[in-house]
Image (cartoon, grey):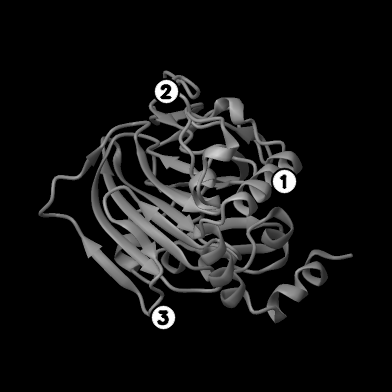
Amino acid sequence: MSDRLAVLPQYLMPKQLLTELAGKFANARLGGLTTAVIRRFVARYGVDMQEAANPDIASYASFNEFFTRPLRVGARPLADAAFICPVDGAISQFGTIECDSIFQAKGHSYTTTALVGGDAALAAQFDNGSFATLYLSPKDYHRIHMPCAGRLRRMIHVPGELFSVNPTTARGVPGLFARNERVVCVFDGESGPFVLTLVGATIVGSMATVWHGIVNPPRPGTVREWRYDNQEIQLQKGEEMGRFLLGSTVVMLFPQEGLDFNPAWQPAKPLRMGEAMGNKSA
């Protein structure tokens, strides 16, 4: 079956309704039912609870409390590199932004302008720069950390679709990461501006940042933006910056000559937060 045919049902299903219902269930405190669902999830996806700060499944009052669980101290040491991996997950794609075009999968690409919600001036700062798209599977740790130190400048919530973001969908839905709902976080770092984009998906109830809390819902259907030039919000490399309440994908943008990727990186490679992503360009 072709990838486009495989994703056809996603065009037909009521993705937003399913996502809203899933979000309500994930936040519900249902006692023994919640514990049973978490136990089944852990068994099905092979979640390693020994990495969690609290490994007791029965102690989580809601599914989202379990899903966004913190890790025990020392579970993710930070590599001695200028840029580190911000999440647990796998590499979807990475490489050079061709002028303003980001490679998604064979036969598919999208523009930086579309990704950041239509701001051509912001997107132009990353022409011929670097990108990395990292996919978080259900079993992964779902907090997002800083790949390098940065000062927050802007946050943009871009409304959109809620397609799945798994590898099959990335191959079958054109412009997937610039079509789905997303939260674009813009920082200034030592090597220039950089962007972390949190991409929503089917069943992803919401996304949150440490400085704002839950960004969505609400979902008003229009682009929303917050500017932080008058606030000193500085996050250090490896510090938590946000989380998915049910998982998804992170797309990062870096300026030209800002980053040389780790030569060990390759598509589909599994990653852990804190591993070396690369160093400053020579």
Residue 129 left/right relative to 50: left
Residue at screen point 42% across, 18% down: 80
Mark 1 vs mark 2, CA separation in Å: 38 Å
Which is nearer the eye, 155 or 35?
35
Relative placement, left or right, of 120 versus 10 is left
| CA distance for labels 3 and 2 | 39 Å
- Tell whether 23 sits left or right of 154: right
Which of the two discs, 3 and 1, sits closer to the camera? 1
Amino acid on which the number 2 mark rests in the picture: Ala
* Residue 221, numbered circle: 3
Residue 233 lies, in percent from the top left, at 19, 45
Instruction: Identify which residue, 268 or 47, lies in the foreground.
Output: 47
Of residues 75 and 196, the one nearer the viewer is 75
Q: Residue furthest right?
A: 1
The kind of residue on which mark 1 rests is Arg
On-image quarter of the N terminus = bottom right
Amino acid bearing label 3: Gly
Q: CA distance from mark 3 to mark 1?
A: 35 Å
Give percent across and percent down for residue 7: 75, 69
Camera-nearest label, 1 or 2: 1
Q: Residue at x 46, y 35 (%)?
A: 70
Is the residue 278 above or below the residue 182 in the image? above
Where does label 2 land, which residue? Answer: 81
Residue marked by disc 1: 40
Classify the position of the C terminus by image quarter.
Answer: top left
Label 2 environment density (alpha carbons within 10 Å; few <14, some 14–19, many ≥20): some
- Which circle's residue, 1 or 2, is located before the other in the chain? 1
Disc 2 is placed on an element classified as loop
- Image marks 3 and 2: residues in contact by CB distance under 8 Å: no
